[in-house]
Image (cartoon, rainbow, N blue to C red):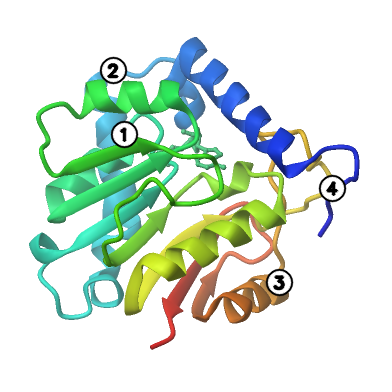
Amino acid sequence: MNQMPDITIQEQLEKMRRDWDARARENARHYVESSRTEWSDEEFFKSGECTVAGEILTDMINICQGLLPQQMKVLEIGCGAGRVTRALARLFGEVYAVDVSAEMIEQARHNLQGLSNVHLCVNNGMDLSPLPPIQFDFAFSSIVFQHIPSYEVIESYVREVHRLLRPGALFKFQVQGGLSEHSLPDDTWVGVSYTDEQAVALAERCGFEPRYRVGAGEQYFWLWFFKRP
Ligand SMILES: C[S@@+](CC[C@H](N)C(=O)[O-])C[C@H]1O[C@@H](n2cnc3c(N)ncnc32)[C@H](O)[C@@H]1O
């Protein structure tokens, strides 16, 4: 879908890794949260707590479904330097987080050292094969898929999350919902865009119920995909 023939998916994945590694080396915190160039430790991790307060603490009924947060195993895709991961680890029992960039993961390891319930790993940019075969109770991804220039890669992640989620559990994530005319297959900053109809079709193809969708037509298009029992 929407892929130009002159770049393979493998080349796209390599480009994602290369570009994000370079961004991490240049100024990881800025590329992770671009509203500032310089971030102190305190402000950077406070912004991650704000993400959790806004997207998770307000939504605990859908997320926990009767479980205690401390009992839950949570997956984060595209953790970057651990900004949100740290706040997730304060709330939930175990947090597994992946990122395509080894440089980002290295920074996350440094930032999250001492948190024994955080498990970080580099992945290939489209599947979750490095993770152990455990069942997750919740999966989350924020400001990651909006940068992915491939419908195939995003669909691969949705199928992978389906493979690892407990039946009935929620995958809450954000995609680009604004105009996609600037998305090119080798651009790892502006990702492909979804209409509401495309998001619903994606969920149905991958075994999810797309129960809530907020922000269609906007950059921050949030999706609540519940794994069909
Ligand atoms: C804007 S940062 C956001 C990081 C984190 N989610 C946060 O909110 O702090 C985007 C992150 O997604 C990662 N990323 C980009 N494409 C990816 C892919 N295909 N698979 C996994 N991670 C990816 C980047 O390496 C980067 O760390």
Q: In which quadrant of the rendered image does the N terminus lie?
A: bottom right
Mark 1 residue crowding within 10 angstroms, few (<14) / some (14–19) / many (20+): many
- Mark 1: which amino acid? Gly
Q: Is residue 181 visible in the rendered structure shown here?
A: yes
Judged left or right of residue 40, residue 24 is right
- Decide which of tag 2 and tag 3 comes sooner along the chain: 2
Q: Which of pointers 4 and 2 lies earlier in the amino acid sequence?
A: 2
Dot 2 crowding, Cα within 10 Å, few <14, some 14–19, many 20+: few
Q: Which mark is residue 181?
A: 4
Q: Which residue is mark 1?
A: 82
In the image, is the residue at mark 1 within 8 Å of ligand 1 by its beta carbon?
A: yes
Location of residue 85 by image quarter: top left
Q: Nearer the viewer, mark 4 or mark 2?
A: 4
First of labels 4, 3 by sequence position: 4
Residue beneath disc 2: 40
Point 47% across, 22% down: residue: 30
In the rendered structure, which amino acid carries the disc numbered 4?
Glu
Using the numbered discs, state the Cα–Cα distance from disc 1 to disc 2 in whole angstroms: 14 Å
Tag in front: 1 or 2: 1
Q: Residue at x 53, y 66 (%)?
A: 159
